[in-house]
Image (spheres, helix red, strand yellow):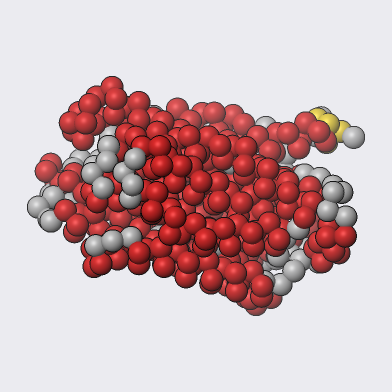
Amino acid sequence: MSIQGVTREQAVRRATVASVVGTTIEWYDFFLYGTAAALVFPQLFFPGQVAFAGVLAAFGTQFVGFVARPIGAAIFGHFGDRIGRKTTLMATLFLMAFGTVLIGCLPTYQSIGVAAPVLLVVLRIIQGIGVGGEWGGSVLLSMEWGDQNRRGLSASWPQIGVPLGLVLSTGVVRITTAATGTDGFAAYGWRIPFILSIILIGVGLFVRLRVIESPEFDAVRKSNKVVRAPIIEVIRRQPREILLSALVRTSEQAPFYLFITFVITYATKQLKLDSNSILDDTLIAAALGLISVPLFGRLSDRFGRRRVYGTGIVLTALFAFPYFGLLNTRDALWVGVAVVVSLILHDIQYGPQAALIAESFDTDIRYTGAGLGYQLASVVAGGPAPLIAAALLATYGNSTSISLYIILCCVIAMAALIFLPRAKGALAKDAAAAATPGSP
């Protein structure tokens, strides 16, 4: 069958590639800030403070980006449910890249004083709004074009934008640090990864211009069922799904930002380890995520979303104390094991997560509903996590309280998973999977 001059297989491939490329660019930009916040932003934008206060201030500006993400989900969700996934995703790509490149050109505190951290916050908000609108559209474009019996796998492809973005951002920082040296990176080298983001824009635009609109949204539009005010409609019809979608991410979102950003601060400040070795470990773990994320998405098609996701929650809770125990050995091998295992356990949840959340919402309000639920977790879990961990470490001087914090996040997520309403058809699919676990 031909659609706008291309076969369905070509349309599916284009949608999948566009989703992966877009989310990779968005997350490259977003993670780059987190790495810089841990390594150089405290002294560049918040000098004159004690070390701990500077770290808190840097992570505080990072948190601002998380707060902006639900705003982006609401804004772009409105347009995604009104005019379509494709057009909306072009706008999110521009916005995110704009904020990132300007951060790379931003004068420091030494040059313009207090205006520097103020402008940093403004650009972080722009980043947050962009990434907040990106996720919902990318997931839906891939999932709604994909095979109905493999939605877990289809929706997981945009999710690999996270490990890809992490690989790119960590790799570029690692290469730049090696090329400029520690002092050179702090002086000017940190700007290079941010400015390089402009190169990725051309690739993203080329890929997304060739995408055909989602068939499910096209059907909604042709049947005149496009809602006038998606955000009002989703809050009226599915408020429970929004709240529980946010809470179910607590066990994935909060530990993840401890595993990739706070760990750099903990390893370098508390354990006196070399930041480059931690970046190398993160790079290896993120590269493995290119396999593990779609793998667990596919497994959710075979065994059920909740079963796979719940397994990830339990294993993350069980790893909370061993994680810091391995880090505290200060041995390079065991530290590497801690970093790699932590991100694999994250991927057990992240693989099926997109389909789990997106399937919970009706098609005509899915972009807004899924985006809001997903991004609200950034405010209650992801954003505060490094701040909370830093405060706990400063208060108690050890990692025990941070491990307990991770376990608490897992308890909250498991409760939300239990009460999250199942999508129509999901009950039958999970029952069939349970009866014949080897079947596709």
Vertical order, 237 against 290 (above or below): below
Vertical order, 412 against 112 (above or below): below
268 sits left or right of 322 in the view? left
Closer to the camera in the image, 359 or 295: 295
Residue at 21% across / 35% down in the picture? Answer: 186
Residue at 34% across / 35% down in the picture? Answer: 277
Q: Position of residue 426 (x, y in %)?
A: 80, 63
**In the orientation shown, which residue stands out farthest toward the left?**
48
Residue at 88% across / 55% down in the picture? Answer: 436
Q: Position of residue 251 (x, y in %)?
A: 52, 62
Kindly indicate the quadrant of the structure image that contains residue 281: top left
Q: Position of residue 151 (x, y in %)?
A: 75, 50
Residue 368 visible? The answer is: no
Closer to the camera in the image, 280 or 322: 322
Vertical order, 194 against 148 (above or below): above
375 sits left or right of 127 in the view? right
Residue at 81% across / 45% down in the picture? Answer: 147
Q: Quadrant of the N terminus?
A: top right
108 sits left or right of 84 in the view? left
259 sits left or right of 373 in the view? left
Residue 40 visible? The answer is: yes
Q: Position of residue 240 (x, y in %)?
A: 63, 76
